[in-house]
Image (tube, helix red, strand yellow):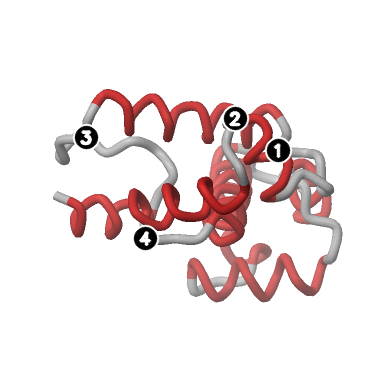
């Protein structure tokens, strides 16, 4: 189950339907996702702020995120932002890549383009 869970979180930030997760772990992932969603457009929202919103120390957050998702909090946050960008690009034809970039809290166009292409295999403009 842990391996399936880690594989799922490499692709998506949503909770999987096909893997059994304890209630406490489900609540934790929902809390993290809610905190990220609430601060999605805030480019200065990082691991320290996520730990504070999760009522954990940064080291506890790191350990728990690594155990549940197989990703460190920075990678999970980046993947969440990139997935949100892909969802916005897919659901809003004609939206500019630059506005999507700012909506998901990424300020560097080159970083956004590079990370997006690395995750999805397409540049944001090709994906749109």
> N-terminal of the two: label 4 or label 2?
2
| Front residue of 117 and 56 | 56
Residue 72 against residue 39 in the figure, above or below: below
CB-based contact (under 8 Å), mark 3 and mark 1: no
**Image quadrant of residue 71?**
bottom left
The kind of secondary structure element at disc 2 is loop
Query: CA gap, disc 4 to disc 1?
Result: 22 Å
Label 2 close to label 3 by CB (< 8 Å)? no
Residue 55 image label: 2
Q: Which residue is mark 4?
A: 70
| Label 3 residue SS | loop
Instruction: Tell me which label, 4 or 1, sits earlier in the chain.
Output: 1
Identify the secondary structure beneath mark 4.
Answer: loop
Q: Give how far apart the Cα atoms at labels 3 and 1 are.
A: 25 Å
x and y percent of residue 26 in the render? 33, 29
124 horizontally vs 31: left or right: right
Q: Is residue 56 above or below residue 79?
A: above
Q: State yes or no: discs 1 and 2 in contact (Cβ < 8 Å).
A: no
Label 1 or label 2, whichever lies nearer to me, is 2
The residue that appears at 77% across and 47% down in the rendered structure is 105
């Amino acid at each position: 189950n842990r391996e399936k869970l880690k594989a799922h979180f490499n692709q998506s930030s949503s909770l999987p339907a096909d893997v059994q997760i304890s209630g406490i772990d489900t609540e934790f992932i929902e809390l993290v996702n809610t905190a990220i969603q609430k601060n999605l457009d805030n480019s200065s929202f990082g691991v320290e702020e996520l730990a504070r919103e999760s009522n954990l120390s940064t080291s506890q957050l790191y350990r728990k995120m690594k155990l549940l998702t197989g990703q460190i909090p920075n990678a999970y946050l980046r993947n969440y932002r990139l997935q949100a960008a892909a969802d916005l690009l897919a659901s809003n034809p004609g939206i500019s890549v630059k506005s999507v970039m700012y909506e998901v809290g990424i300020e560097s166009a080159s970083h956004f383009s590079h990370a997006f292409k690395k995750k999805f295999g397409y540049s944001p403009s090709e994906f749109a």
